[in-house]
Image: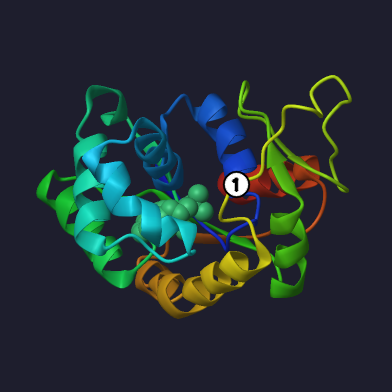
Amino acid sequence: MRMIFIGPPGAGKGTQAARLVERYAIPHISTGDMFRAAVAAGTPLGKQADAHMRDGRLVPDEVTIGLVMERIGQDDAQGGFMLDGFPRTVPQAEALDRALSAAGLQLDVVLVLEVPDDLIVDRITGRRSDPETGEIYHVTFNPPPPSIAGRVIQRRDDTEEACRRRLAGFHSQTAPIVPFYEAKGIVRRVDGVGAPDEVTTRITAALTGS
Ligand code: AMP
């Protein structure tokens, strides 16, 4: 299964992607996670990505495309993958398409998770994660258990200002890639409003047609 996951920041892609990759036994390739790891490790890639990410702006296409092409060429991605956070621009979608076609491959599904803008800011600014397990929480909607409440952290780009910039970028740069995939007949749209389990049920139905 080769799939990509598209949705605004805070739509719940990370949470749902983690469930899907377990089910399909494919690697979860999140460009945001890869960039955050590179920033934390202080690599040259991390240094390039750092300022863009902090402000809620996209990392330049040439950097991002190179990173993803290398990742999907690795052994564990040969049977399929879940791309989360990539492609985010039309040139990224075109580069992925070219690389897959050259290898005689194609995407099976493009999952579009839809959440209205007015819910996004609340979701993002309340988002916290456990650095030890990667589990994602929300201060109001899904509070961390008291035993770990003291160690949860907030992403530095989860401020209201950076969130609004990322949301604007989603609408201007990422949403336009959906028609590119609609033309191939592989887009499945899913309502992302509601509890995570409800959204998982909708995704399962959209993927299996049940
Ligand atoms: P995410 O975790 O997907 O919200 O990504 C966090 C940040 O990483 C984004 O705001 C961008 O700065 C950067 N980033 C992640 N994926 C991409 C991408 N496909 N193209 C450019 N920048 C990206």
**Residue 24, x across and y down, in percent:** 49, 29
The type of residue carrying mark 1 is Arg
* Image coordinates for residue 135, horizontal then vertical, percent: 67, 30
Give the image quarter of residue 138.
top right
In the rendered image, the vertical position of residue 86 relative to residue 116, given as above or below: above
Q: Which percent across, then down, holds residue 155?
A: 60, 46
Quadrant of the image occupied by residue 158? bottom right
Dot 1 alpha-carbon crowd within 10 angstroms: few under 14, some 14 to 19, many 20 or more: few
Ligand 1 placement by image quarter? bottom left
When the figure is inspected, residue 120 is found, relative to residue 145, above or below; the finding is below
**Does dot 1 land on a helix, a strand or a loop?**
loop
Q: Quick check: 58 left or right of 16?
A: left
Please name the residue shown 67% across and 37% down the image.
Answer: 153
Please name the colour scheme applied to the rendered image. Answer: rainbow
Q: Residue at x 71, y 41 (%)?
A: 128
- Residue 107 seen in the figure: yes
Q: Is residue 17 left or right of residue 2?
A: right
For residue 210, say whether it is visible: no
Q: In the depicted view, which residue is nearer to us: 187 or 86?
A: 86
Position of 209 relative to 121 (above/below) = above
Q: Which residue is mark 1?
A: 155
**Residue 108 coordinates in the image, percent (x, y):** 38, 48
Within 8 Å of ligand 1, the CB of disc 1? yes
Q: Residue at x 67, y 47 (%)?
A: 205
Of all residues shown, which one is farthest toward the bottom?
172
Q: Quadrant of the N terminus?
A: top left
Q: Is residue 75 left or right of residue 34?
A: left
